Structures are given as C-alpha cells and as structure tokens.
Image (cartoon, coloured by chain):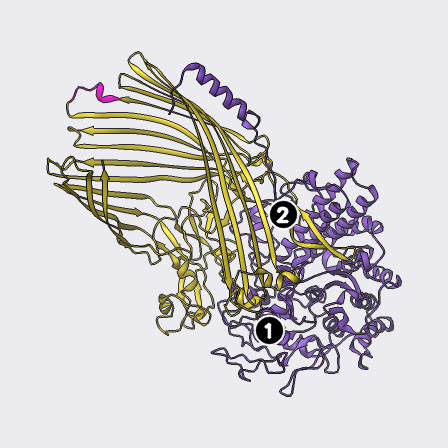
Chain colours: A purple, B yellow
Amino acid sequence: MKRINIIGKLILVSLFVTTFSPSCTNLDEELYDVVIPEDFLKGEEQYVAYLGQAYTKLKDYGTGGHMQLSQGSADQGVYPTRGTDWNDGGVHRRRQMHTWTFEDTGGTWDLAFSGISDCNRLTESYLVLIEDGLIDVEVANRFIGELAGLRAFFYYLLIDAYGNVPIVTEFSTADPAPATKSRKEVFDFIIAQLDEWAPKLEVEVGGAAYGRVNYWTAKAIEAKMHLNAEVWSGTANWDGVIAACDEIINSGKFNLEANFFTNFDVENGVSKEFIFAIPYDKVFFKGFNLSFHTLHYGNRDTYNLTGNPWNGFCTMEEFYNSFDDKDLRKGEPGTLDGPATKRGTFLVGYQYKLNGELVIDDADGSKDPDGPPVNFMPNLSTIGPNTLRQEGARVGKWEFEIGGTDNMSNDFAVFRYADILLMKAEAIWRKTGNPADATALALVNQVRTTHGGNEIGLLTTLDGPISFKIEEGSVAGGELLNERGRELAFEMHRRQDLIRWGVFGEVAKWSPPTGVSDDKPFNSDPTRTIFAIPRNQLENNRNLIQNPGYTSAGAGG
Amino acid sequence: MDDLIFDVAYSFQSNSELRNNYESKESFGGGLNRNGLATKESKDFYNQLLESTLRWNGNISNGTIDVVGGYSYQEFYEEGFRAQGGDFITDAFAYNRLKASNDFKTGIGDVTSFKNTNKLIAFFGRVNMSWDQTWFLSVSGRREGSSKFGTDKKWGFFPGASGGVELANFINSSSINNLKFRVSYGEAGNNLKDSYLSLVVAEPGDDSFYYNGDYVPAYGPLRNSNPNLGWESKKEINIGLDYSFFNDKVYGAIDYYSRKTESLLWLFGVPQPPNLASQTWANVGDLRNSGLEFLVNLKAVDNGSFSYIPTLTATWYIENKIVSLSDPDNGFVFGAGRNLGGMGSPGQNDTPLVHIEEGAPLGQLWGWKYVGISPTGELQLEDISGPEGKPDGGVDADDRTVIGNGLPSFEIGFGNSVRWNNWDANVFFRGVFGHDLINSMRAFYEVPAAIRSYNVVSTARDMKNPDTGAYLNSPDGKLSDLYVENADFFKLENLSIGYNLKVPSGSAINNVRFYFAANNLFVITGYKGTDPEVRYGDSEDDNNPLVPGVDRRDTWYMTRSFSLGVSLGFN
C-alpha cells in the first residue's frame, strides 16, 4: 500500500488510464482456432469447403442410427442380443418386434434434419454471396440447385420413415418451431422441389461429379417417390415411375456391372451402376463400419483388422434361404476343409484366419453347438437376449479390406442401376397386373442373369411364395419382392418394399422369437409403418404432432 | 485526517499440463483395437489480472464513511496440443516416439491444437457508512463485461445495497448485548464456460467432402450460435438478525434468504429443424429458492481454565422452484415438460433422470415404479398409464412418474469447541435430510446376468423372485424407483485435539502446538451408494443444476483421514 501526494496520484491515474485505455473497455472476441464466415469465404476453395458441410451429414447413413432403424425393423437385418452384447436396453429387440417407443426412433430424424438445416443455411449463404457480388453467380446457382437436390433426398428419407414432418426451406428466417405437415403435403413438396431443381442439376456422371447430387440422383428420388406414391400420397403413379426410370435407362450413362460384387468392392467407385453413392473412406469420410457390426470378434484375424469386431448384425434364416444355392450372389459356406472361395452376400460356415487356421471362440461359456471353432449358422433361434454367439448368417456383401479399421473405405450406393431396372419392372407389373408381363420379366431377368450368372433367371411369373412364409402358395409379386430382396439386400430399401407390398405388419412371421417375455409381443398394428416422432423433438418443438398410435408422454403438447 | 489510497495490483497465473498415455497392444480398450495407442497432450492455461482501486476513508458527523472505486481487467488464455496414434510394431517406445505410429502415415492418426481466449472487465464501487455505531448502510455496484457474450449483451450491471440498525442501542436492557437487524439485496453475474458461443464461426469438422475426385476439407458451423447470449444474474434478498444475549453467553444469527436466478444460462433443447444442432446455449428461465438459517452459539462453560462452546446451525430449505425456462422473444419456448439426463451406457443412454416443468419444484427424479421379479425372472414395472391416460398393458414412457426428490429439505451442523488448560478440541457433526439419490452403481450393476461381461455389485444376488429363486434375466439395468434411495445422513465430519506447550517468554519460539485431526470418522445413513452427499448438479453434464440428485458411477469413495502434527510459531 502506498501513500503519495495528490499530484502523484493524478500522475499515476493518468498513466494508468493512458496505458490501458485502448483496450480498457474493448470486449471483442479474439479468434484463434475458429474463423467467422466473413473472414473465411474468400474464394472458390472456401465456397466448396462450405458446400461440403451438407454432404458430411450423410456419414451416418451406412451403419448409424438411420441404418439401424431402417434395417432393424425389416426382415433382412437383425441385431440379436447375445448375452449382454447388443442389448442396449432392448432397443434392437423392440425394433425387431415393432414395439419401438418414441425414444428408439431418432436415427433418421437426426441425420435428415441436420442435413436439411445445413442445406438451408448454405443456400442462404450463397444467396448472400451473390447479393454481395462475391461469388460467380453461375457457380453459386449450381451449388444452390445441388443443395435443393440433397435436401429433397433428406426429405425422401423422412417421408419414408416418419411421414408427417415439418417442411422447412429457410434458415435464419425460418419459423423457430415449425409445425408438422401431413405426409401428402411432404410428398407434394418433394415432387415440386424435384420438378423445380432437377433441370438445373449436373447431367455428367462419374469423375468430378461422383458422390454428388446430380440430375440422375433427382430422377432416382423421383422414381422412388412415385413407386411409393400410393402409400405416401394415397394415389398411385406407376407411369411416373416408368418415366423417371426410362430417363435414367435411356441416358446410356449407366449399366449393370458384369460382376455383381464390383458394386461392393473396397474400390467400388468405378461401378457403372452407381447413380448416387456416399464416398466412405477410412480416413476422410468415416461412418460405414459394417465389418465391425457383423463380424465375429475372432474375424479380426480373418481380415487382419485393427480391432475386434462386435459380433452383431446378421440375417434371418428365411431370407438366407430365399437365395438359390446356384445364385452367385449368395456365396458359399466355409467348411472344415477350408474357407469359402467365393464372396457372397452372406458369410456362413467356418471362419478362417488369414494364416489358414480356424477362427476359435474359446470364450468361457460359449455354448455354440459346434464348439469353439467359429461356424456361422444361418439358423437364428431367437433375437435374444440369449442368442448364441455364432448364430446367424453374416453380411459379406461388401468386401472387407485386409488390414481394415472400424471405418470401411467401400462407397455405399444409395441408388443403383439394378434398382432402377427392378423399379421399372415393378411399375409395369403393378400397372398391368400381369405377373407374366414380358417387359417386366425381361427387366428382372436382365438383373438376375447379369448378376446371378446362372440360367435359373428365366422366371415365368413375378408371383410366388415370399421368402418368409406369409401364407402357403403364391403371393402377388412375391417373386419380385424376393428378387428385390436378393439383389438389394442390406442396401436399405427393404423396409419400404415390405410396406409397399403390405406385409410389413407380418413381423411375427419372419422374426425369430424373443426370449424375454416382459417385452410386449410383436406389434402388427398398421401405425407401425411410420416411426414415432422422437421424444426430444416433441419436447423441444410444441408444434410437432405425434404420429397416430404413439405416445407423446412427458413431452407435453 | 482523511485517507486516500490508490492501489494497483497485477497478477499472472499459469498452469501447464502435460499428459502422456500409452495403451499396449494387449490392453483391452484402446490398445488392443488400435494395435497400441499412444497419446501425448499438452495444455496451458494462463490469465493476467490488473486491478486498481481508489479508496477513501473519512469521518462524517457521528460516523464514518468508506468509499472504494476500482477497475479490473482480466484476460484468460487456453491453448494446447494433442497427438494420438496407434499401430505400433513394438510397445517399447510407449508415447516417446510418435513417429513410430503407423497411423500417422496412413492418415488415421489424430493431431490437433487449439487456442481460445476471453476477457473480463469490471468497474466497481462501494460506499460504506455508519452513524453512531447504530445505523449502517452500504451501497455497491459492479459494471462487468465479458467478451463471451453477444455484441450488445457483453455488459451487465450488478448492484447491491444493505442496511442495518443496532437495536440494542435503543433497548435499555443489560441482558441484550447485541441485536442487529439487517436487510440486504445483491445481484451477481454468472458467465459462460466457453468462448465464441455467440458467434457464427466456421471450423473444420471430422469429415471431408469428395469433390472433383478428391477429398477436400468441409467447413461450417458445428453448433448453433446465439447472438443474444448475455449474463445470467443471481439476485438475493436477505433479512437477518444478529444477536447476543446475557453477556455474550448466547449469540448467533437468524437469516431468511430468497434467491432468484434470472436469465439462466442453459444448453436449451431447440427444434431441429430449423436449427443445425438440437441444442443452443441461451438465457432461459428463472429459478427461485428460499430458506431460513439459524445459528446459535452457547458459552456453556467459560472459566479461566475450562470452556465449552457448542454451536448449532440449521437450514430449512423452503422453496426450490423452476419459475420459467422460456425466452419467447428469442424463440426459446420450453413447452409443457421435458425429461433431462441420460443414465448412460450400457443400455440406458436414453433413460431420462429428471422431469422439469415450469412452475414445478426442481429436482423431480423421474422413472418407473418397481414391482418385482416374476417367477420366471422377468423384471416387472408398474403399468400406471398409457396413451389414453390409463393403464394399457405395457410399460413404456407413459408409465414414468416422479420417483424421488433430489434436493434436501433440512440441514444441520453441530460444532463443539472445548478448551481445558493447554488442551483444545473441536468436533463437528453435520447432517442433511430430505433428499433422494439415484444410485447409478446399483441401477447398472445390480444385474446378475451382467456378470458374464463385467463385475456386478454384491446386492445383485438379491435380484431374484422370492418364491422360485429365479434371477432377474435382463441383460442390463433399467432405472426404476428401486434405485432411488433416501440419502439422509448424519456424520462426524471432523475432529481435532490439540495441546499447546508452554514456552518460556523470551525464547525464539513463541508457540508450540501438537495436534491430532481426523475427517469422516463415521456416517450414519441408509444410503447404499458411495456417498450420500447432495448432488446439486449432474457431474456428467457440467454440474447442470437442473439435474440434481444423481449419484453417478464416477463417485469416488469418501476418504477417512487422520493426521498428527506439530505447529511452531516464531517470534
């Protein structure tokens, strides 16, 4: 403490004030590891980096929450509970039994709406850049069109999953709590958006445009919209499907790959079938980790993976059996004589290490009938909680990279040419009602013979028994549904297909039984064809309306 | 003579951390899955403070005046660096040779650095006055600014005032030595933890964008921003009485307080769409709490060689209420009710813990009601409602209800100070009553079947049907009121005994004291978890005050400590 005279005090005070006055009341934030957009957006390099943000929202498509909702509720993919593995509070069993609650259904919402919000934000940013004369108008408009196309894709996922959702195309000026719109309104919105923006999209494919939304992506979405129009809008539009598919087919830009598995290789970006693919990469674009979801812990040594896989995702026996043994897409089991020599949609039978030894599961308590050597059995006795560790055929469709990590580099085809051909065939069949329609059969056989590589593709009718026994005898379009299942297995079209065929509610017929009786029994209610609006969204937005048949407990409203 | 004092103080504080970690190729967790995993991380925090005050003490007629004014300027910096890579050929280097990690060559290795800063500037003043040793008045104000808030919201003003009167001076009674009545009002600001939350900023995310045949970085905002972020303020009214009777034989205080938190800073759940992320930092809401505090000291015995003074403190928590959690002007509308928390993994990630509603008390624990275990080992919970408001035959979100209260209603402290010749002793007991805790340890690990994957608690043995003996067959836990426990407790918090040695006058040492001290000697409680203390905020969520009453699995055991010591004082 100092005591000095008045003059001294004044000198000190003024010294103090002058020393610190420039910053004395300045509270501007100083940025070091983040940048404000005005300082960032200086040229095309940054405009492109900005655009990329919207695409990164696709990362959870491959094996994230969206995939688990979409696949886990249908008849191909299942995550059985093996002891405490893959129990996760019973969510996987609830999805399988169609008894999910509004706390189990957030995956698609989170993916799609975070993407939509980004598309809206970026559209607004590019419009401002145009207004300020900072960006080439043509470049900006191309980006804006692309974002509208991407947004339409996200809405396509939403109309499929939830039906009734808010429609938002603005960002800073948007309603802070947008209200639910009916599925019909969402349908009309997506169609109108596609009509408006598709003509402005890039028509070149591959190369520079790979992995981006282009004209053909818009056409594929349009085909899917019309294919499901009867379910989603109440009015069928088979001609719309045919027209959209024809445009893609007649463009000559796509073709079936002679080898089915080219579409699923690690280096599958070369495929002539890809209309829209997500370019996953173990370093640059992470999010597709099917290998870890489906493989047994011991399969680490089969592919020299960097970690132990999680022994989860597998398929139902009936679906496995819907493939003919001669179908090259099926694959063959590994035996005690050696591993499977051909790749297939499924991994079954004995598993081998890279060095040729059998993979052994010597964990204490393994009750698998064939003992410690890992032998994937197509039979799935229960969806849990006490599914055996080796039960269930695994997914081998996508090539597992030797030395891979828990992020695969295989790209994921969202829309594939084979699907376009099958969609067109379905539209023709549904329009004519003739299960032996030659044009439709030719399209199905084109896919079958090219990819199956065998002679059994000469179908005489699209009808037939369904892979899971819905009833004895023939089901209208049953064989076509089976064929879509075989060709597009695990590509996330199955739930939609089952709903369109009206058999989604037959869950009790395809699902293995559950081992816990405190879970509610299978729920076949028609309200299950759309998911519940997630709890946190209902809580946070009072203008959302819960879908019929679901609770909004604790969320008010 | 009046005094005018000018003080300038400068301080610089620095804290550096260096963390090294290596998980061997065989270690479960990171090492095994990454073929060895090395992490090297350094962090530096530093801040500098410049504070100057001008103080004047003076006399006014029959009284004194004390005026202080000042300015304070504080800058905070945080910066650091981190590198993590795996895939080693040998464990030999641990974290000492990151270049040996193959992950850096394949692009899987992770390297990052960060730096951020913020400023806090304040102008403050205070006037203390007293007259006749009877009337007291104090008025203060603090204008404080933080760089973390929105452009127009950086500055806040936090006034305070208090007044008192010594009533003993008006009452002519020899038994009343002191009777001071006080009233005070004060406001204080509460700041955000992170910088830049009010700004729209671009930053690179984890993922790239496939553009023209190559991956390019993707940039954009990774969170919602809020340009209107401003100070949270706490306002408190306090009315109290200090008393001392019978030659200071009985003395203490009685206080009533009422506190209000306004513009609560909270990571508010917002609609998505239209937002980029599902939560935004916002000033939403008012919380209110009030209570009554008593303090009494009694000089039970006090003669030259022996004294015993017990001290009793008691607090009644009268109200703890969520008044509002909305800011409709800025688009933040709370709605009818929300469930917060998230029990965690495995299996209970989406299990809410607390239910909040505007107008309702804070700390309502939320969940299912436990019924029992069926003869076949199924968990049975009570079906209390359904979509139509009545039991529907199944147990789901409709059947959750209030299953406990996370905040206490009463707290007591009991101190005992004894002095006998050269000996002195202090014993302090403390008890808190009326609060419940979610015992997370039990809610996760009281599951017999989970023993296949991890350790369970010993009470898992009790999780069986009493008739058939069938154990609970669920593979993982499920929160219900079975795991909500009353956590009343009374404990001997600390005890100390000392002996003061007589020192001859004139020696270099003027004071020698030997002492023994102990903490946490015993706790009386029915709570089965590690620590029955009140959890005022969620330890897994930045101590979020809206989620009290959760004993998380990271609670460490209370330690009981004993110490023996000698203290010396020198002339």
- Which residue shows up at 72% across the image and 82% down it? A325
- Please tell me whether mark 1 sits on a helix, a strand or a loop: helix
- Whether residue B75 sits left or right of residue B495 in the image: it is right
Residue B426's spot in the image, x, y percent?
21, 44
- Furthest residue to the top? B61
- Which residue shows up at 70% across the image and 44% down it? A121
Quadrant placement of the N terminus of chain A? top left
Q: Does residue B71 sit above or below A402 in this rendering?
A: above
Is residue B171 on the magenta stretch?
yes
* Amino acid on which disc 2 is placed: Leu
Q: Which range of residues does the magenta coloring cover?
A: B166-173
What is the chain letter for disc 2?
Answer: B
Q: CA distance from mark 2 to mark 1?
A: 34 Å
Q: Which residue is mark 2?
A: B222
Residue A300 - label: 1
Q: Is residue A468 visible?
A: no
What is the chain letter for disc 1?
Answer: A
Is residue A231 on the magenta stretch?
no
- Whether residue A444 sits left or right of residue B415 in the image: it is right
Foreground: B303 or A195?
B303
Q: Does residue B518 sit above or below A519 in this rendering?
A: above
Q: Are marks 2 and 1 in contact (CB under 8 Å)?
A: no
Residue A153's spot in the image, x, y percent?
73, 55
